[in-house]
Image: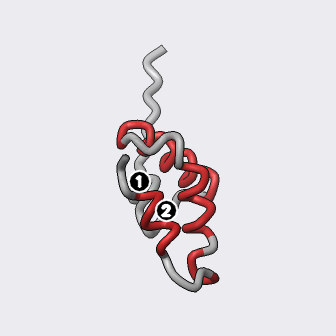
Amino acid sequence: DEKRYEKRISYPKGEPENPLSKEELLNKFKTLTTFGGYENRSDEISNLVDRLEHLNNIDELSKLLMKS
């Protein structure tokens, strides 16, 4: 059988025209924090970022982002 299938993707996943879902974005973030040394704080960081507009200041977030 010499059938040939082809699919063209104009905008790869993650581009503004084809954005990641919130779940995909969180999974990507958790994967990247593992390599960055933040795996123990990734849930706390993502929770703070998710409610960033409601924070009075970003001190708590800044402390989580400081490597120790």
Q: Secondary structure at mark 1?
A: loop
CB atoms of marks 2 and 1 within 8 Å? yes
Q: Secondary structure at mark 2?
A: loop
Q: Could you tell me the amino acid type at mark 2?
A: Asn
Query: Which residue lies under the disc numbered 2?
Result: 18
Specify whether 13 is left or right of 43: left
Residue 53 location, x and y as percent?
58, 82
Residue 22 location, x and y as percent?
62, 59
Q: Is residue 13 above or below residue 16?
A: above
Q: Is residue 43 above or below residue 57?
A: above
Nearer to us in this view, 50 or 19: 50
Specify whether 26 is left or right of 5: right
The image quadrant of residue 34 is top left
User: Residue at horizontal 53%, vertical 49%?
Assistant: 42
Q: Of the residues under marks 2 and 1, which one precedes in the sequence? A: 1
Nearer to us in this view, 4 or 40: 40
Query: Which residue lies under the disc numbered 1?
Result: 12
